[in-house]
Amino acid sequence: MGSFPQRARGRLVVVDVGGGSTEIIRGEGGQVQSLASHPMGSVRLTERHLAHDPPLEEEVAAARAAADAAFEAVGPAPGATVIGVAGTLTTLASVALALPSYDAERVHGAVLACGEVERQIDLYWAAGIETRRLVPGMDPRRADVILGGAILVGAVLRRLGAAEIVVSDRGVRWGLIYEMIEALQ
């Protein structure tokens, strides 16, 4: 957790929203306490519920309900630092920062409040895919699934009772490198 030394003390929850699933890892003191894979990711949610461009109100309501149901077993994590990894989270951070092009150093460590996630959900819901591609900070390749991903992030934050999520630009490869370095010491 050298990437977030000031935040990585105590209880942590790591959220990885993928295309087909979302992983939630809980830990404390550098030890994993639990790992759960939930079979709902940004692509799956989009394909199942967000058929129109832009989505209809009932489609967004169905997507929100599906996201809430997918994380029904996720309990609150009072006092935990919530860290988000992977493309959905880094894209949300890049848009929040209105970056003209992706900047890993600015994205890494960015904090997204729940209100910002909801603001982006509203933004993507109101816009078609072509308009989403033009949003400052948007990776155009994610424009078709970012609404689904943002809905999932919002649902996870509600279930955890978290007010914010810290974004990490470092993924699994960084973790493996840290482990390899620690093993050499």
Image: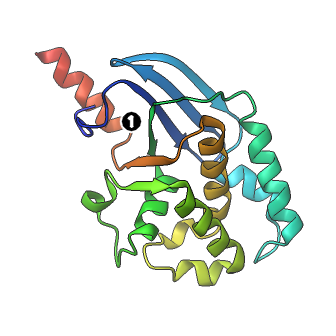
Q: Which is more toward the observer, 104 or 82?
A: 82
- Residue for point 22% across, 34% down: 2
- Residue for point 32% across, 50% down: 109
Q: Quadrant of residue 175?
A: top left
Q: Position of residue 138 (x, y in %)?
A: 48, 72
Q: Label 1 neighbourhood size at 10 Å, few (<14), some (14-19), many (20+)?
A: few
- Colouring scheme, one of rainbow, by chain, secondary structure, one colour: rainbow
- Residue for point 53% across, 63% down: 116
Q: Is residue 40 above or below residue 77?
A: below
Q: Quadrant of residue 119?
A: bottom right
| SS of the residue under disc 1 | helix
Q: Is residue 171 above or below residue 95?
A: above
Q: Quadrant of residue 137?
A: bottom left
Q: Position of residue 143 (x, y in %)?
A: 59, 70
Residue at the right extreme, as displayed: 58
- Residue for point 43% across, 61% down: 93
* Circle 1: residue type: Val
Residue 128 relative to residue 171: left or right: right
The quarter of the picture where the N terminus appears is: top left
Reading the image, the residue beneath label 1 is 172
Q: Position of residue 38 (x, y in %)?
A: 68, 33
Q: Is residue 162 above or below residue 176?
A: below
Image mark count: 1
